[in-house]
Image (cartoon, rainbow, N blue to C red):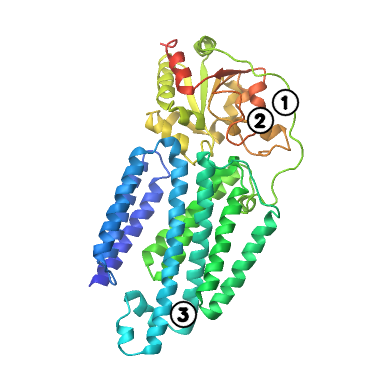
Amino acid sequence: MEFGFTTAAYVVAAVLFILSLGGLSGQESAKRAVWYGIVGMGLAVAATLIGPGAGLWWLSIPLIAAGGFIGYQLASKVEMTQMPELVAGMHALVGLAAVFVGFNAHFEIGNAAEALAAGGDAVKELGAFGKLIAKKSAVEINILLVELSLGVWIGAVTFTGSVIAYGKLSGKVTSSAEKLPGGHMLNAGAAAISVICLIWYLNTAAFLPLIILTIAALFIGYHLIMGIGGADMPVVVSMLNSYSGWAAAAIGFSLGNDLLIVVGALVGSSGAILSYIMCKAMNRSFVSVILGGFGGGSDGPAMEIDGEQIAIDADGVAAALDEADSVVIIPGYGMAVAQAQQNVAELTRRLRAKGKNVRFAIHPVAGRLPGHMNVLLAEAKVPYDIVLEMDEINDDFPETDVAIVIGSNDIVNPAAQEDPNSPIAGMPVLECWKAKQVFVSKRGQGTGYSGIENPLFFKENTRMFYGDAKQSLDTLLTMIQ
């Protein structure tokens, strides 16, 4: 009876997770999709707690309550600008959980083997998972060891990779691509050690090869992500999301948990598809990015930039906007840092009230997380129909009177088209420099998160609107009524 209920609950939960993923593809359905996911996860946890093999309620309930409390506190206090690193942190926890579950499964297999050797009451004293293992054939045990090893390996890669991604996104680790002496050969060596340890483990079922395999995987995760530059971090976050899903699926096979397999496969496949889409949008090689930049980039010198950055004040920007008929606003991470989305929305409302055509241009990797800018604009109640993707609006820039760039760098960098030696060479960008006038809201003359110089700031039709984006827009709004 319990087994039937658990199976039915898992099926319903899986359907809810699929509906959740599908709903997240649209801005209007996203809120409902989140609730599908919440209900699905609640149902899955409840079904697992009362299903076959459940036990240790006195420990499970406090741990779930503690985890829920910590999650609530984080969600309540984290700023939208910190969401990318929070997501990376969550991926790290999933990876670490996969490692611990894999280790536990290893010990359960050992206990089952000892109980079978002892016979009698020893088998009866095994837990539900141990009894399940005791019924497996030698071939099935070997398959289980492979699944366990894969779960641990992927989980370890995900853990250290996500920790480094968190560090890069939060500014605690350099955003530039860095590798140890030996570069990709070290990754290849660690991968070879992992394969050798897997063979060793399958032949002995000893804990030592599993530990060495885990250490090699931890190194691979660290070194791979250290070798990826800041411009590719949105892809990295999505890629690590995929890794965490595959780790969960592998552990699901080890535990014989159908829902964990389904959910892991959903997360893994959707993350991989999103990573591929973003790589395509950035003209990046998917294989190059996931291998820490292997085979990508140019070693030649960057193109020299002529000219100077010319500043403009709020009066000048207000005058240009007053004369403009069409305006395109390009938001970036700087807008999120300054929490300027409400000011941007108010500027949009005032300009549209004057009869001006105002639209937003969103690059697929704007910010440091896919969809980051869309969420901020939705939070500020900017109408969905004027928020356009890069492919929808790029051809309109030559007919645009004013383009306003707020805290963006790489996604509006003409070096992607003009400099074959640029780290972002070939990456599709928003061609805002083709507008009649370009105003760039920026704190100072720095190169931004990825450390790449931007020729846009030196072009004749570009003016730099220096200062904190929120404060600059506050001043501008006093002049536009």
Report helix, strand or loop for mark 3. helix
Local crowd at mark 1 within 10 Å, few (<14), some, or many (≥20)? some
* Mark found first going from the N terminus, 2 or 3: 3
Q: Which residue is mark 1?
A: 305
**Residue 324, placed above or below residue 51:** above
Report helix, strand or loop for mark 1. loop
Quarter holding the N terminus is bottom left
Q: Which residue is mark 3?
A: 140
Q: Which residue is mark 2?
A: 453
The kind of residue on which mark 1 rests is Ile
The kind of residue on which mark 3 rests is Glu
Q: In the image, what residue occupies the spot 35% across and 74% down?
A: 129
Q: Which mark is residue 49?
A: none
Examine the rendering and report whether any part of residue 273 can be seen.
no
Nearest the viewer among 76 and 266 is 76
- Give the percent coordinates (x, y) of residue 213: 56, 67
* Mark found first going from the N terminus, 2 or 1: 1
